[in-house]
Amino acid sequence: MIEPTVGPVANRTTQHDWQPHVRDFLTYLRVECGLARATLIAYESDLRDLINDLASRGVLNPLNLAPQHLADHLRVLKTDRDLAATSIIRHLATIRMFCRFLHAQGRIEENPADLLERPTRWRHLPNVLSLKQVTALLNAPRPLENPDAPPLHLRDRAILEVMYAAGLRASETTGLTTNNVHDTLRVIRVTGKGGKERLIPIGKPALAAIHTYLRECRPRLARPDVRDEGCLFLSRTGRPLERIALWQIVTRSAAKAGLKHIHPHMLRHSFATHLLSGGADLRVVQELLGHSDVTTTQIYTHVDQRRLKSIHKKYHPRP
């Protein structure tokens, strides 16, 4: 991976003339925009695809970019690689930002991405759990048969409770520290995408599950020879819990509850949908989810058709 550190711009056209520009672009995204490492990796991967494709056609320097080059690349992604519209849109977003950066820096005279058309994308409605299914999922973790083993069911229950109570992403859940839980205010401090922090209220069940886990389970998982960075949720080995392990906890608990095709993000979807169904303001849900754009949150207003029908029946003059 190209490290996002500033480097000198090459003066002559070689196959390496892309590298200084990409390196400076990644530095800009990391320092100025505050994007997360996973996002930086995605941007770099898209640019690598672009560079390799253009290099195969003799375009070895971003200073020689033309709109047709970019259009041809997007066509390759669609026809040769058969990428979905959502993937092509992500590639296009990367290309637009990269070209905008080069133009703003004065490295190219005109932005070749200005004329690119955005492919249409269908927005899929998220799958959500019913209240009955959520209850079954939260109650699924059970004690192990071995009484000497750490009570991991307490950790798993706390994870599920927190994810549903606060609508957290998997990465946000594994990134929680013990200092992020504020008992007096009954809120947790969450670091979301781009390093943005937000405070989210949590109810008594989630807070009680956290306290039980901290009291009866986490001390048995923590090891003096392992650095846990103060992370709230630990693995069997005492290390910070990773996202793949959290995914396994959710799917394993879902199987115990008799639920299929459940993944961690469904708890976040359910959190938002249930709040809106209960009458919560869309802007409040946006703030709780950490969405920068309310249009991202609006998708949840289309999920509960039953509520929409009841409102229509109640208020329309000719129901």
Image (tube, grey):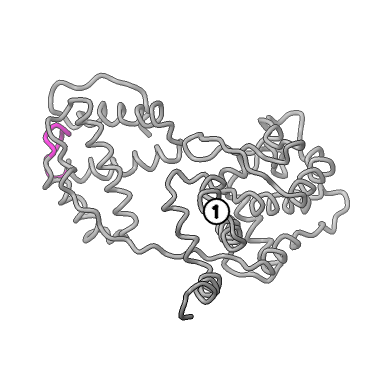
Image vertical order of residue 143 relative to residue 60, above or below = below
Q: Position of residue 24 (x, y in %)?
A: 30, 26
Image vertical order of residue 77 relative to residue 218, above or below = below
Comparing 45 with 32, the one in front is 32
Q: Quadrant of residue 280?
A: bottom right
Image vertical order of residue 221 relative to residue 146, above or below = above
Name the residue rendered at 30%, 59% in the picture.
83
Q: Residues within 10 Å of mark 1 (few under 14, many from 20)?
A: few
Give the labeled residue for mark 1: 281
Read off the magenta span: 56-65
Horizontally, residue 118 falls left or right of residue 274, namely: left
Name the residue rendered at 35%, 64% in the picture.
122
Horizontally, residue 259 falls left or right of residue 63, namely: right
Q: Quadrant of the N terminus?
A: top left
Comparing 138 with 204, the one in front is 204
Q: Position of residue 61 (x, y in %)?
A: 16, 33
Image vertical order of residue 206 relative to residue 179, above or below = below
Q: Position of residue 158 (x, y in %)?
A: 73, 50
Kind of residue at disc 1: Asp
Magenta residues, dominant SS class: loop
Q: Is residue 41 magenta?
A: no
Horizontally, residue 273 falls left or right of residue 106, namely: right
Task: Report the label total.
Answer: 1
Q: Position of residue 73 (x, y in %)?
A: 19, 50
Name the residue rendered at 74%, 63% in the picture.
140
